[in-house]
Image (cartoon, rainbow, N blue to C red):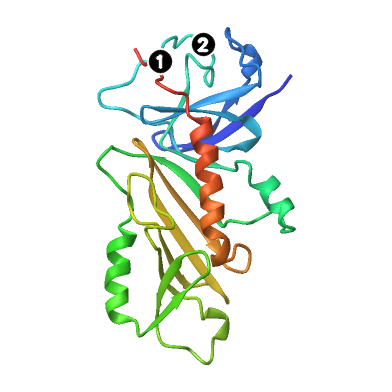
Amino acid sequence: MTRFFAFFLMCAAGAAQAIDLSPERCQAKDPDGLAYIALGSTVLKLPIRHLNVTSAPASSAPPLMAPDPNEPVGCRNNPLRQQSLMINFGFDAWLKARDKPSGALLKEMTLIASSTDYWGIPLDERHATRCKLYPRTRTLTNGLVGCLPALAPRHPDRDEVGSYRARPEVYKAPFDKPFVVACRPSIPKGTECHVSYKILPTVNITYVFVTSRLALDDVIEFDKRFREDVQRAVVPEYKWN
């Protein structure tokens, strides 16, 4: 029997509780044993081994009614509704193919339920501001163009700190938005980068990585693969009651 215990923080109760996701108990059993998770009105079907539920269950106004709330939580007719979800999709195969370690590639990666008009952290606006202030530019082979502060001779390991935006003819975020990577000094050394954008109408994504594990030259390819994985996980035209 395949089971997964999803642990999350119950804000009102102030205590950790667990939800038992057992796809084999669903009336309409998913042939691949997938769990159904709702972020806003968007429903994703995911292998339970990829899930790390980290927030309290979502609340909606007006509430979305599952087709069959008597089904176990996580079934197609009663998705587990969350405010955010940390996940690990199919990165391992790509990493192994590129002879890179499959563990700890990202410091964090989260899908977040959002309203349709919330576009996430305004990295593009911040990029424009930093490009007016920073004296250096750098063009990477994958199409990222960076604006960088002055060199810090005492910290050569932080030479990648700055703000990078993909040339629009090369790559964009969904909904025709710029793809921006904001990089800052990492502690105790190195460079830490942040990506944030709307990936689906009611879902935003944010992830953080260090360039010693995921090179800036590889981030567009990485992001492209991740977006493909998310699109494959969406349940099309899910019908709420």
Query: At 56% across and 35% down in the image, what residue appears?
Result: 7
Q: Pick the quarter of the image with the C terminus.
A: top left
Q: Residue at x 63, y 42 (%)?
A: 90
Q: Is 116 rendered above or below residue 4?
A: below
Q: In the rendered view, would you say 18 is above or below 89?
A: above
Q: Residue at x 40, y 15 (%)?
A: 66
- Would you name the residue on which mark 2 appears? 71
Residue 91 appears at what percent x and percent y?
63, 47
Q: Residues within 10 Å of mark 2 (few under 14, many from 20)?
A: some
Q: Can residue 187 be seen here?
A: no
User: Where does residue 18 sit, x and y in percent of width and height?
Assistant: 57, 30
| Snapshot quadrant of residue 105 | bottom right
Give x and y (percent) for residue 227. Answer: 50, 43
CB within 8 Å, label 1 to label 2? yes
Q: Is residue 194 left or right of residue 96?
A: left
Count of marks overlaid on the render: 2
Mark 1 or mark 2, earlier in chain: 1
At horizontal 49% and vertical 35% (from top left) the residue drawn is 231
Which one is nearer the viewer's eye here, 210 or 16?
210
Q: Which mark is residue 66?
A: 1
Instruction: Look at the image and tell me whether residue 139 can be seen.
Output: yes
